[in-house]
Image (spheres, rainbow, N blue to C red):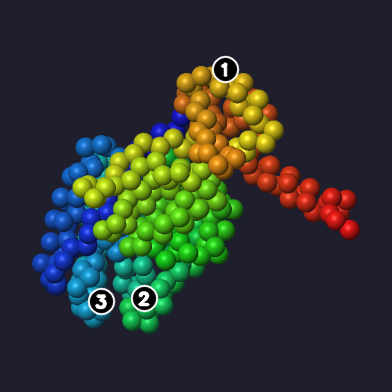
Amino acid sequence: MASNVVVSALCPSALRGKPSGQEAVDSMIEHWRQQLDFVLPDAPDLIVLPEACDRFPEQSIQERKEYYRFRGDKILNFFSGISKEHNCYIAYSAVRALPDGSFRNSTQLIDRSGKTAFIYNKNHLVISETEQGGILCGKEAVVFEADFGKVAFAICFDLNFHELLEKYAKQRPQLIVFSSMYHGGLMQNYWAYHCQSYFVGAVAGVQSSVVTPVGTLTAHSTNYFPRITASINLDCKVVHLDGNGQKLEALKNKYKRGVDIFDPGLLGSVLVSSNMEGISASDLIEEFEIELWDEYYARSLRHRHDPKNIER
């Protein structure tokens, strides 16, 4: 059944200057208060912030570490208050200082009650993050079950590594949350299609974007407005066209506007989404005996590896 989720992503340029102590915290909170005011009227279910969103790039490494230790959870608590007041999730991406003196580059998912529901630690760091910044690589890649669907997380350099992508692809998240300072180009589209997941990215000073499970850009920020809000329907399935053409036609003829069949072109696959209450995309697939892309892919592999189908 229709599962419409409103997502917002913010991508302003990083705050300039080299403040310290409480002045740094106060100026950063005011910066993000102003940015959030642009998207909160849309009543988003999820707000995604860029990587290291509360960092001052002009600080030296040592100044930055001192700032992180002083900041602690002060800015996290600010975002927690926003989440609770506006009944939304916030993906807060920031460097965390741990008690053992090391650091993590993390996305903390704050839930609608203002509590930290999940923490993802960046798995694939740029080498200098560890050698200069004392940040250690995360080792977990777990999909989190939010109240609106299954969510995976990636941060910046992560987007280059199939090791992480394959871990997520096996778990089939419905939404990938990407906080970054690097856009990734075609890798955003590739991750979305490979995981058959919507992808929402917030890239500091560059672009926020929403990509569909068939790899098409459906929303993006502009040079005028460093933010987006989009409504996406997570109740969807990716279907290959082989053997399904007449079934998809019959599906559309029966349910009309109750179903969307989106063809991105050139791919050979379409996205089937249910717009109806009480009837899910899975129900539609079952009713018309439509073969999903995963099933078609597995069947094709079995065919290829059957000895009778291989050249002698």
Few, some or many residues within 10 Å of mark 3 (<14, 14–19, 20+): some
Residue 125 shows in the view: yes
Q: Residue furthest left?
A: 23
Mark identifier at residue 65: 3
Element carrying mark 3: helix
31 or 141: nearer the viewer: 31
Few, some or many residues within 10 Å of mark 1 (<14, 14–19, 20+): few
The residue type indicated by label 3 comes to Lys
281 or 269: nearer the viewer: 269
| The C terminus sits in image quarter | bottom right
Quarter assignment of residue 118? bottom left
**Disc number lying in front (2 or 3):** 2
Residue found 51% across the figure and 25% down from its top:
259
100 or 44: nearer the viewer: 44
- Taking the image as shown, residue 1 lies to the left or right of residue 283, namely left
Mark identifier at residue 254: 1
Few, some or many residues within 10 Å of mark 2 (<14, 14–19, 20+): some
Comes first in the chain, label 1 or label 2? 2
Which residue, given by chain and number where applicable, does mark 2 sit on?
129
- Taking the image as shown, residue 284 lies to the left or right of residue 107, namely right
**Disc number lying in front (1 or 2):** 1
Task: Give the CA separation, mark 1 to mark 3.
Answer: 60 Å
